[in-house]
Image (tube, rainbow, N blue to C red):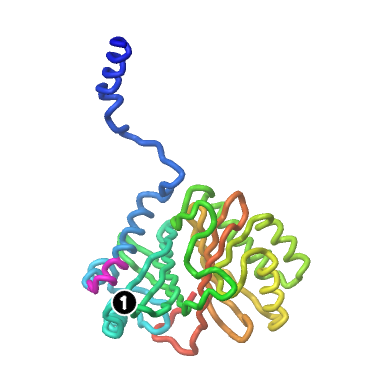
Amino acid sequence: MSLIFSVTMIAALSPSATAAPRHPQPNAFESIATPQERANRAVVLGFYTALNRGDLGYLDKMVRPDLVQHYPTIANGRSAFRAYHAGLRDQNPDLRFIVKRTIAQNDLVVVHSHFVGKAGDAGIAKVNLFRLDRGKIAEHWEFNEAVQPRGIGNDMFSTLSSPRISKSLPFATDAESERVGRAAFAEIVNQPDDELRLQALERYIGDNTYYQHFPNVPNGTEALQQFLHDAYAAQPDYRANVKTVVAEGDLVAVVAHLEKLFDIENSVSVDLYRVRDGKLLEHWAVIEPIPPTSANPNTMY
């Protein structure tokens, strides 16, 4: 007994046993972003924290004065961006931006958020895209869609695929997620032939549940097949032109210019996918029509 006790005490008191390792091994839930991508994400998340506090001085520090703006209601430049958010807070003193997920790759950061202007409002599903230059926000895109009741589908924000963690996870590489995200548009969304699209659905979704967060579209490939069949039946010239793809781990965001989606002549979509083993697990989306005029000379996409 005394020998066992002595060995146990020595092990317990040994510095190697009690000290935390200097270089802990990464686990499956740690970010795979580079230091620069993490820094960019921190700047952008600081932007949302500042907006929730009403601290517009953060914009003065972390947004470039020559900000390139793509959202149609805002002119180029930091001052116009600041005035927009000042007006938003004047209209909604208790506003909240609830960040749901972020994707950081190179100099781009995508933020999927739920904006609530007043308590009890359903709010707006937002996707904002930021380009950073030397630690400051240099370019901005924004896309909004009113939150719709759940109806026959899932809500617009939750994570349902396993593990139910909203941040990007290293279960896929950036390159793999980008490849599958682009393929989803090239071989599924932009495929008017039902049979060929069905083959692509099998290839990129297969037996997965494919959790769907697009309003009133149920889970699974059958519902997605029907949605796209109906889109082409309504508008045979329907087309989704991919403009920007941002991937981090198992999350990928695809920004596309949509032509002739049902009764909308021109719109922009941001589709977010979760990718695993080369297949699509889950999907979120925001679609906003392109207005006829803009306060800036830049495209929405």
Name the magenta segment's main secondary structure.
helix
Instruction: Report x, y in % for residue 165.
Output: 46, 55
Q: Picture quarter containing residue 233?
A: bottom right
The magenta stretch spans residue 52: yes
The magenta stretch spans residue 55: yes
In this orientation, does residue 98 appear? yes
Residue kind at label 1, given as amino acid type: Leu
Q: Tell me if residue 157 comes above or below residue 104 in the rendering.
A: below
> Which residue is label 1 attached to?
95
Of residue 126 and residue 74, the one placed in the foreground of this image is 126
Q: Tell me if residue 93 comes above or below residue 278 in the rendering.
A: below
Of residue 265 and residue 194, the one placed in the foreground of this image is 194
In this orientation, does residue 80 appear? no
Of residue 124 and residue 38, the one placed in the foreground of this image is 124
Helix, strand, or loop for circle 1? loop
Whether residue 45 sits left or right of residue 210 in the image: it is left
Q: Tell me if residue 227 comes above or below residue 19 in the rendering.
A: below
Residue at horizontal 50 percent and vertical 51 percent from the top: 163
Of residue 123 and residue 301, the one placed in the foreground of this image is 123
Residue at horizontal 39 percent and vertical 72 percent from the top: 140
Q: Count every numbered label the image shows and give the total.
A: 1
Residue at horizontal 65 percent and vertical 69 percent from the top: 189
Instruction: Report x, y in % for residue 109.
Output: 41, 62
Quadrant occupied by the N terminus: top left
Q: Picture quarter containing residue 223?
A: bottom right
Instruction: Report x, y in % for residue 117.
Output: 35, 79
Residue furthest to the front in view is 1
User: Residues in magenta?
Assistant: 47-56
Number of other residues with Cα within 10 Å of mark 1, as a class: few under 14, some 14 to 19, many 20 or more = many
Instruction: Report x, y in % for residue 10.
Output: 27, 17
Residue furthest to the right in view is 195
